[in-house]
Amino acid sequence: MRVTVVGAGVVGLTAALELSERGAEVEIVERAAHLGEAACSWCAGGMLAPWCEGESAPAEVVDLGAQALDWWARRVPGVASNGTLVVAAPRDVGEIERFAARTLNHERVDETRIGALEPDLAGRFRKGLFFAREGHLDPRMALGALRDRLAERGVAISFGVDGAAPSLFAGAVLDCRGFAARDALEELRGVRGEMLILRTKEISLARPIRFLHPRIPLYVVPRADGLFMVGATMIESAERGSVTARSAIELLSAAYALHPAFGEAEIVEMRADVRPAFPDNLPRIVRRGATNYLNGFYRHGFLLSPAFAQKAAATILRDVRDTNENHRQRRRA
């Protein structure tokens, strides 16, 4: 069973691993010159937070995303299971009530409990929500770990190969090109996301913090060596480009409001990319001719890729088996 996976972002790598683990002979082709160069998953927050996402996402995201933490923990190192803390400024405590009403599996926390969970936030927030069953990972480390795990299984990634012509590849083809697949999936739209990476030794966080604001909700995700990923923007646009001045100001202002130490942080990186989304903001598997397309992950790449990788692998391998059986029957006839 030969399968060519097109695209080496999080969706392509998780699907390739699922296919390999189920016995397929897999090859990955990627148009970029190296891992992460053209993948919007390189800019992701890496939050495995299905119940928080339920604030705005359909129930399917919550149900399928709940599988993600275990899938990642069994396959890559460094997955943290410290939960998610949601807070709001005292003047915006109504946002906490709104968020609580739309989500499940959270614990209401007061000022004392917030300080116990995150000592550097002690005394800054009166009310919050703690989602103890959630987790997070570093996306770039996770992509590298998937690449290494695939290599151990004999799955190679061919970089610098344009996968826009699937008929050139042997065997079944699974297209995971993200927004680049809009040449075949006309219904895809782009949702621009912008992020910052800051470095400071003045604050320490054990888990992702979602800082609610009526206009500019923010998340801060801790990484190693005093690094923090700051993000939140969702702009209906297919323009990549650089981070805009407005977004940079809003993200930095919100980070400063979360903790003033971020005002003195070093800006290590500013980056923008376009996430692919279908009209309902849910991923799907689309069959076009001999090619299956796995796409439309919107802002849920790391959260939903395990569940959809399993679905795609099962679909493709069933189709291959059915095709092979039909060929055998015709030969007998």
Image (cartoon, grey):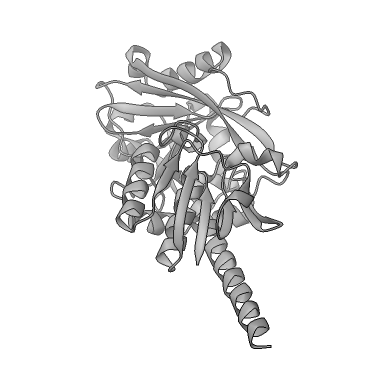
**Residue 323 appears in which quarter of the rendering?**
bottom right
- Position of residue 261 in the picture relative to residue 102 (left or right): left
**Residue 139 appears in which quarter of the rendering?**
top left
Q: What residue is rendered at 42% in x and 62% in y? A: 20
Q: Residue furthest bottom?
A: 333
- Position of residue 72 in the picture relative to residue 237 (left or right): left
- Position of residue 245 in the picture relative to residue 136 (left or right): right
Q: What residue is rendered at 49% in x and 55% in y? A: 15
User: Which residue is nearer to you in this view: 151 or 120?
Assistant: 151
In the rendered image, the quadrant that contains the C terminus is bottom right
Q: What x and y, as percent, mark residue 94?
A: 58, 34
Instruction: Give the answer, above or below, for where 260 lies relative to 312.
Output: above
User: Which residue is nearer to you in this view: 204 or 114?
Assistant: 204
Q: What x and y, as percent, mark residue 166?
A: 62, 49
Q: What x and y, as percent, mark residue 164?
A: 62, 41
Q: What residue is rendered at 67% in x and 82% in y? A: 330
Please count the marks in the image: 0
Can residue 33 be spotted in the picture? yes
Q: What x and y, as percent, mark residue 203?
A: 28, 25
Can residue 295 be spotted in the picture? no
Q: What residue is rendered at 71% in x and 44% in y? A: 185
